[in-house]
Amino acid sequence: MNTPDQQTAQEQAARKRIKDSHALDSDASRLANFYRGWARSYEMDVDRDGYCGPMIVAELAGAVQTAYLARQRTAIAILDAGCGTGLVGVELERLGFRLIDGIDLSEEMVEQARQTRAYRHVRGDVDLNGPLSDYASASYDITVCCGVFTLGHVRPDGLRELARVTRPNGFIIASTRKSYAEATSFEGEVRRLQDAGVLVLAQRLNDGRYVAEEDAHYWVFQVLKKASAPEEQGP
Ligand SMILES: C[S@@+](CC[C@H](N)C(=O)[O-])C[C@H]1O[C@@H](n2cnc3c(N)ncnc32)[C@H](O)[C@@H]1O
């Protein structure tokens, strides 16, 4: 059994690893390398830090299905974008969802997700900062994305591809740490996609619990019929 001093040291080390993960500049090889080394102890670290994002995101998916989707949970196709070790998938499965696919940059994180058996398919080496070329448009009823719109990880324009792979009238549920929402153009990207008729903001939980040191916003977007945003304008 750990002494209180050891526990404090472990909590500090966990927070340092979490903080270090925010300084990776959305660089795919640095991110993959960092998570390669973190995959085995990730869940212990985030648990020490009181991480409750996955439960909130999964429960929002449950509420959206009950409120808006006619089909049973067992027939709702969900993409967990940036699934990591599978914390969201496990919560979704607990709530009765069964058709859950996970994608992530890190093969090692995905291997942990595979072992949960909560997922139908999981796939690593998928970069959410680029086009999801292997994924057809309108493939999923709900796309969830937890802990991924985070500093140093996925840029706000990654939201456009999540909208593309989600079917019209389907939903995207995403967390953004407060620091991410403040430091990036995420809100601007949302406005741009709304103006282009790609999605609408259906709900937002402001300043919800997330980790011990920081809250997050939780966003629920509904994807509209015209799910492909115009390309970025050149200079
Ligand atoms: C903080 S973890 C969150 C994992 C999981 N969703 C959760 O809530 O526990 C961030 C995850 O995003 C993945 N990730 C970071 N940048 C990525 C990118 N550009 N494309 C795909 N996945 C990425 C990491 O590999 C890691 O598994």
Image (cartoon, rainbow, N blue to C red):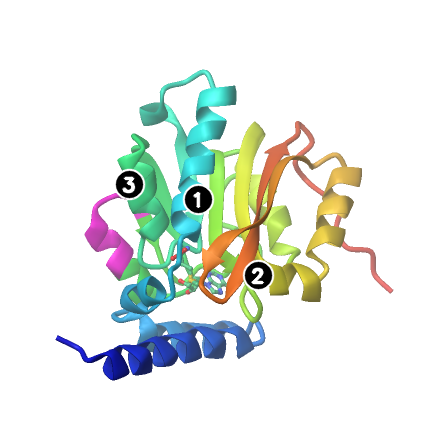
Query: Which three-letter amino acid code belongs to the residue tagged 3?
Result: Arg
Residue at image x 41%, y 72%? Answer: 32
Residue shown at 74% from the left, 39% from the top: 194
Q: Residue 144: percent from the left, percent from the top?
A: 47, 44
Q: Is residue 234 left or right of residue 21?
A: right
- Residue 12: numbered disc: none
Residue that numbered label 1 is attached to: 56
Instruction: State whether label 2 is within 8 Å of ligand 1.
Output: yes
- Secondary structure under the numbered disc 3 in the rendered image: loop
Asked whether 226 or 70 is in front, the reply is: 70
Quadrant occupied by the C terminus: bottom right
Mark positioned earlier in the residue sequence (1 or 2): 1
On the image, numbered disc 3 is attached to which residue?
120
Most extreme residue toward the top, as rendered?
70
Q: What element carries label 1?
A: helix
- Residue, disc 2: 129
Q: Distance between the residues labelled 1 and 3?
A: 21 Å
Asked whether 89 falls inside the magenta stretch, the response is: no
